[in-house]
Image (spheres, rainbow, N blue to C red):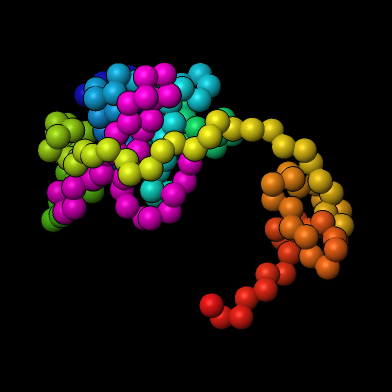
Amino acid sequence: MNQELWKKAVAFHGHECPGLAIGFKACEAAREKLGIGVSDDEQVVCITENDACGVDAVQALLSCTLGKGNLIYRGTGKQAFSFFNRTNGKKLRVCLKPGITQGMDRARSQDYLLNAPVDDIFTFSEPNFEPPQRARLFQTVVCEICGEGTPEHKIHLQDGKKVCEDCFQSYNRGW
């Protein structure tokens, strides 16, 4: 285990925990199997299926962030991360094996996750989806109800007015 990288992830997250260890090891697996490292732009993309502690390791160690557009949240709730290398087209989905730390206390669980080989912790497959487009800049449109600026791809037309997501009243008849 790379202690320097673990310390970097812990410093970013704020404390040590088994959840952070999952993300740390997912990054290790992606580095080993895809040959990726820190992404200074959008060369590496991570689609995380959870919003738990491990996502902080992805941000700290691979520099995948919401702000750069190379960290995407896909809320299935699974401890799974799909990594895409835009430079060479390689991709990998890393998913925590169920129950591998069952019956362990928090400290033992974290220790096991940090020190076990990635092949013992995760299943590996190819993601069944492609990475999203690169991030784009959009024109700002002012909502005609609240007066706040919203990117044009998030604007709705309602009663002939341009309205933001917050002001839009969806029409749903139960379908």
Does the magenta run of residues contain 128? no
Is residue 53 left or right of 94 when viewed as pictured? right
Q: What segment carries the magenta color?
A: 72-101
Side (left or right) of 151 relative to 38: right
Task: Return the x and y of residue 54 as percentages of the image width and height.
Answer: 36, 41
Q: Residue at x 36, y 55 (%)?
A: 77
Quarter occupied by residue 66: top right
Q: Which is more toward the observer, 87 or 44?
A: 87
One can see residue 3 in this view:
no
Rendering coords of residue 26 (x, y %) = 29, 34
Task: Tell me which residue sits at (33%, 44%) in the image.
Answer: 128
Say whether residue 84 is magenta.
yes
User: How many numbered marks does the figure carry?
Assistant: 0
Residue 109 horizontal/vertical position (percent)? 19, 45
Residue under the point 53% across and 34% down: 133
- On the image, the x and y values in percent for residue 139 come to 77, 38
Residue at 50% from the left image edge and 32% from the top image edge: 70
Q: Quadrant of the N terminus?
A: top left
Q: In this orientation, does residue 171 appear?
A: yes
Residue closest to the eye, 74 or 67: 74
**Dividing the picture into quarters, in which one does residue 21 lie?**
top left
